[in-house]
Image (cartoon, helix red, strand yellow):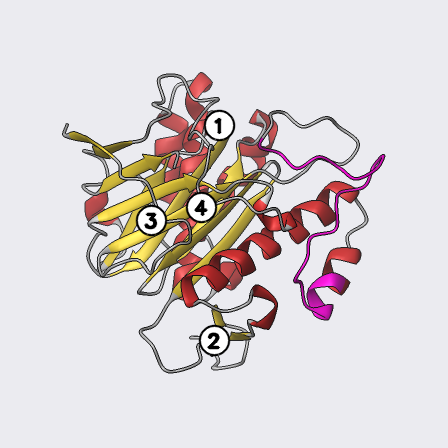
Amino acid sequence: MDTAHAPAPDPVPTRPAPGHVDVWLVRPPLPGRPPADHHTPRPSGPGHAPQPPGLSSAELRRAASFARPADRAAYATAHTALRQLLGGYLDRPPAALTFVREPCPGCAGPHGRPAVVQAGGGPPLHFSLAHSRGLIAVAVAPRVIGVDVERLPSPETVEACARALHPGEQAELAAAPPGERRAHFGRLWTRKEAYLKALGTGLSRHPRTDYLGSDLRRRPARWAVLDLPAGPEHAAAIAVPGDRPDHVTVRWLPAGLPYGEDTPYGEDTPYGEDTPGANPGGTATRSPRSGSTITRSSR
């Protein structure tokens, strides 16, 4: 296993080179509860998250439609972080970005993968957004990409949802030691959702259709699906068409950034502070499972 120190990112993100993928993680605020650490935005009042800037009227309406304050905060934080990041990559004001839907690969309707309108005809920049209770992920690449993150489910949820898996995945899950089944299911499900997002179908394609288990030879041809480090409480994965990425960089996004605070991207946010053995300085590791270099960077 080769290791090397990860370089510090620029104050604003630069477009990933061909063969590279950037993944940004951020923790949403938890209304009515104190932050778990100093990287989590503090609510502006009891039971209320601070209002993030730059969202469109449609996004604000969507955020307001959630009944639970935690769900409103997670949605608003996720979409504000997405705008801040894409604005940095594209050198445009986050509030000026326009999002569209690509044609659905099944029916050609306007409900396929989300995309950002790029002015000036520059090289394509693709993204994917996911959020689960306690964690948000944004993946950016020069080719189509899907990302998913999930909080590890309860044993009861694993039991109930296992029947939706591919038969080969069900067999692997049943063979896993009881104490490892939650994590194993999380890896299976995030790989599957990342792949279906990148495919453009989402869960309109039945999860049982495709095998995304441990046997790489049985996975969909001409696709690369990689597990990501996301701490002990979550599983995460990305999927891209074609060859495996040469390099995947995973960074924590400063939680103040989506709320308009003047903080450089990747500043003072050690990766995996809740992960045993993580190196806050950032390491690049060639994973035997993925075959790609995954950099965990704090700056």
Q: Which mark's residue is nearer the viewer, 4 or 2?
A: 4
Range drawn in magenta: 39-60
Residue position marked by numbered label 4 in the rendering: 24
Question: What residue appears at the point 44 percent right and 41 percent down from the top-left corner?
Answer: 266
* Quadrant in the picture for residue 197: bottom left
Q: Position of residue 43 (x, y in %)?
A: 75, 37
Among numbered discs 3 and 1, the one appearing first in the sequence: 1
Q: Position of residue 36 (x, y in %)?
A: 63, 25
Question: What residue appears at the point 41 percent right and 40 percent down from the top-left corner?
Answer: 251
Say if mark 4 contacts mark 1, CB within 8 Å: no
Look at the magenta stretch and give its main secondary structure: loop
Residue position marked by numbered label 2 in the rendering: 104
Q: Is residue 271 left or right of residue 80?
A: left
Q: Secondary structure at mark 1?
A: helix
Q: What's the CA distance linking mark 4 and mark 2?
A: 26 Å
Say if mark 1 contacts mark 2, CB within 8 Å: no
Amino acid type of disc 4?
Trp
Among numbered discs 4 and 2, the one appearing first in the sequence: 4
Judge whether 1 appears above or below 266 on screen: above
Amino acid type of disc 3?
Tyr
Q: Is residue 133 left or right of residue 191?
A: right
Residue position marked by numbered label 1 in the rendering: 182
Q: What's the CA distance linking mark 3 and mark 1?
A: 18 Å
Badge 4: residue crowd in 10 Å (few <14, some 14–19, many ≥20): many
Among numbered discs 3 and 4, the one appearing first in the sequence: 4
Residue position marked by numbered label 3 in the rendering: 211
Judge whether 260 appears above or below 28 on screen: below
